[in-house]
Structures are given as structure tokens and as C-alpha cells.
Image: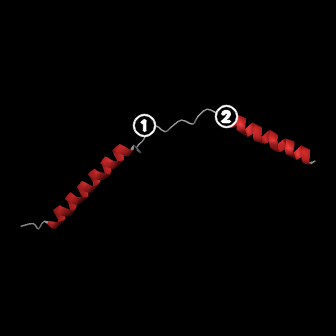
Amino acid sequence: MKRLLLGFLLAAALAYALRDWFAAPEPLPSWEETDNDPEDLSSDLAKRAREAEGADAAEETPIT
């Protein structure tokens, strides 16, 4: 019984190793086709911050 279980364990480990060895690598995400481009996101955040500062500055200036 122990040999049978050990055989199944070794066969499963071998199958798993072969599957990982011959599997195609996962493709890397393309930032060009999404809204999550880090470069666009940082410039967008900077733009939002400038707009918010401009809105705050407009509210603080008294109207004469």
C-alpha cells in the first residue's frame, strides 16, 4: 500500500514538474491598451492636483 501511494505521489510530482517545464510563459500586460498606464496616471494625478489648487486659490481670493 505504501508503495502504491508513493508511486502516485511521484507520478503526480513528475506530471506537475513537466507541466510547469513545458508550459508557455504568461504574457506580460500591455499598458498601452489600458487606462492604467503608470506614466499617464502620474501626469493625470499631477493635473488633478494643479486643478484642485487652482480651485482652492480661486475660492480664497476675495471678490472686490
Q: Please indicate whether residue 20 sits to the left or right of residue 59 in the image.
A: right
The residue drawn where x is 28% and y is 54% is: 48
Q: Please indicate whether residue 42 sits to the left or right of residue 50 in the image.
A: right
Q: Quadrant of residue 19?
A: top right
- Looking at the image, is 1 positioned above or below residue 57? above
Pick the residue in front: 2 or 35.
2
Pick the residue in front: 19 or 33.
19
* 10 Å crowding of disc 2: few (<14), some (14-19), many (20+): few
**How far apart, in angstroms, are the residues tagged by discs 1 and 2?**
30 Å
**Which percent across, then down, holds residue 27?**
54, 35
The residue drawn where x is 90% and y is 44% is: 4
Residue under circle 1? Answer: 33
Q: What element carries label 2?
A: helix
**Which percent across, then down, holds residue 22?**
67, 31
Residue under circle 2? Answer: 21
Q: Which amino acid does label 2 sit on?
A: Trp
- Looking at the image, is 53 positioned above or below residue 28? below
Q: Is mark 1 on a helix, strand or loop?
A: helix
The residue drawn where x is 17% and y is 62% is: 57
Q: Please indicate whether residue 39 sits to the left or right of residue 51 in the image.
A: right
